[in-house]
Image (tube, rainbow, N blue to C red):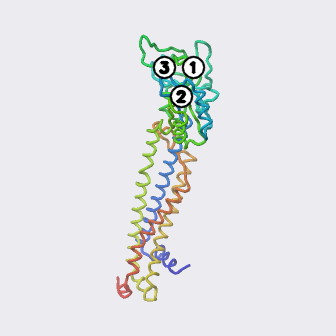
């Protein structure tokens, strides 16, 4: 062990050092540890939020949704689907939909909804895997009754369960004596739970042929849903469809369709590293104070070392090492605390969340690269904080240092 490292450790942890030095050293280490731990926990939670929201939206809706500029939808949608599939790479699946506003009536009252007609064989949503009660069955029972999948939140509000009979009023334009709503009776075949209550309260699923009849849409569809190999490419594919398909096709990525949701996530993420990074900066100032106190206490020892021939650079190394020991100890301890809490939450799910967050527990996603960057930045700040006290210690004159008391 180099003498500078040996002396630095003796200064910090020797029993001969004052209790006050031990105390402020412990406070400095704890300050760095809490700052690093808070930043690791916060970034892991925000990463988890972003992943959960993206995965849930990507599972519930299409990565790209192509609608029509025309009010009568897309009459030649099969040709359009073939053109898009042949011209653009990265498409994993496509399915036509019929989606319009409607009114649901039950014994409990009346509620607005978005009636979504899908093709069960090619449906891209994850609703078939989200059935809470009943079955994923959208085939009509007979000419009178068709089947409907209802969201759990809407079912609770309207007192609906599997087997319930409901009436849906299909709206195609503004209702008037010349444009009366179509009335259709449904049997609720299943209740789904997506984990996103805002959408469970709005979207109800039926067969696309049933939806076409309910809103009097003929054989047209309102849009085409597209699933990609990688949903991060949704914006690129959306722009490509604009160039390839042209009018009347109107493509939008899920990031534009649900922009408020993704903007909310970004707003949550943006200030977190800055605010919590200030904790680490404050902690490094504690190290400055600790080392200055150490310089004051060890002034005579510095004088002795200089009189024995220790250079200014040697004195600086001693106090730089002291600061780095505090920083490294704090960073290691912060990593243990931060990762320990994240792993414990992943395993035991201690903390629950209200409905507005679209999930029941705090989500955690640990990104190793982020943790490495946080640790390196903390060490860099620690090193910078030690330079001034180390420099002041190296400037002490041996004679004055030996006389100091």
Q: Position of residue 21 (x, y in %)?
A: 42, 72
Mark 1 neighbour density, 10 Å: few (under 14) some (14–19) many (20 or more) = some
Q: Residue furthest top?
A: 177
Numbered disc in front, either 3 or 1: 1
Task: Identify the residue position indicated by label 3 in the image.
Answer: 104
Q: Which mark is residue 248?
A: none
Q: Mark 2 near mark 1, Cβ–Cβ under 8 Å?
A: no
Task: Identify the residue position indicated by label 1 in the image.
Answer: 219
Q: Nearer the viewer, residue 145 or 171?
A: 171
Q: CA distance from mark 2 to mark 3?
A: 22 Å
Q: Reply above or below: 307 against 230.
A: below
Q: CA distance from mark 3 to mark 1?
A: 23 Å
Q: Reply above or below: 33 against 85.
A: below
Q: Mark 3 near mark 1, Cβ–Cβ under 8 Å?
A: no
Mark count: 3
Q: Nearer the viewer, residue 115 or 193?
A: 115
Task: Identify the residue position indicated by label 2 in the image.
Answer: 223
Q: Nearer the viewer, residue 90 or 115?
A: 90
Q: Position of residue 344 (x, y in %)?
A: 55, 50
Find numbered disc 1 in the image and state the secondary structure of the residue it sits on: loop
Is the C terminus in the top left, top right, bottom left or bottom right quadrant?
A: bottom left
Q: CA distance from mark 2 to mark 1?
A: 12 Å
Q: Is residue 157 left or right of residue 1?
A: left
Q: Position of residue 45 (x, y in %)?
A: 50, 48
Find numbered disc 3 in the image and state the secondary structure of the residue it sits on: strand
Q: Position of residue 72 (x, y in %)?
A: 50, 22
Mark 3 and mark 1 lie on one chain; the one further toward the N terminus is 3
Find numbered disc 2 in the image and state the secondary structure of the residue it sits on: strand
Is the N terminus in the top left, top right, bottom left or bottom right quadrant?
A: bottom right
């Amino acid at each position: 062990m180099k003498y500078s490292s040996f002396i630095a450790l003796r200064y910090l942890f020797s029993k001969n050092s004052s209790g006050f030095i031990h105390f402020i050293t412990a406070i400095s280490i704890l300050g760095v540890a809490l700052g690093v731990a808070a930043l690791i926990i916060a970034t892991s939670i925000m990463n988890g939020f972003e992943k959960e929201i993206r995965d849930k939206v990507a599972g519930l809706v299409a990565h790209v949704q192509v609608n029509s500029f025309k009010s009568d939808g897309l009459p030649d949608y099969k040709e359009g689907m073939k053109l898009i599939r042949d011209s653009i790479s990265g498409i994993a699946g496509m399915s036509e939909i019929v989606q319009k506003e409607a009114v649901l009536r039950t014994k409990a009252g009346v509620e607005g909804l978005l009636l979504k007609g899908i093709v069960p064989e090619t449906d891209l949503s994850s609703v078939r895997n989200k059935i809470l009660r009943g079955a994923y069955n959208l085939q009509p029972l007979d000419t009178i009754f068709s089947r409907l999948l209802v969201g759990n939140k809407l079912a609770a509000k309207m007192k609906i369960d599997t087997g319930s009979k409901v009436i849906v009023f299909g709206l195609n334009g503004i209702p008037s004596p010349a444009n009366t709503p179509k009335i259709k009776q449904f049997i609720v075949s299943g209740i789904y739970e997506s984990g996103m209550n805002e959408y469970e309260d709005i979207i109800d699923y039926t067969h696309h042929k049933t939806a076409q009849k309910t809103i009097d849409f003929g054989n047209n569809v309102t849009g085409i849903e597209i699933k990609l190999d990688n949903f991060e490419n949704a914006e690129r594919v959306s722009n490509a469809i604009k160039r390839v398909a042209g009018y009347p096709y109107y493509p939008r990525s899920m990031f534009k369709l649900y922009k408020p949701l993704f903007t909310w996530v970004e707003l949550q993420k943006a200030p977190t590293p800055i605010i919590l990074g200030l904790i680490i900066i404050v902690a490094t100032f504690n190290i400055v104070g600790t080392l200055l106190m150490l310089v004051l206490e060890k002034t005579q020892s510095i004088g002795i070392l200089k009189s024995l021939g220790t250079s200014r650079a040697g004195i600086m190394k001693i106090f730089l090492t002291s600061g780095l020991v505090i920083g490294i100890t704090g960073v290691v301890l912060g990593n243990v605390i931060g990762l320990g809490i994240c792993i414990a939450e992943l395993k035991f799910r201690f903390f629950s969340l209200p409905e507005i967050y679209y999930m029941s527990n705090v989500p955690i996603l640990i990104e190793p690269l982020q943790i490495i960057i946080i640790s390196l930045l903390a060490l860099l700040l620690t090193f910078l904080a030690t330079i001034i006290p180390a420099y002041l210690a190296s400037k002490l004159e041996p004679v004055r240092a030996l006389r100091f008391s």
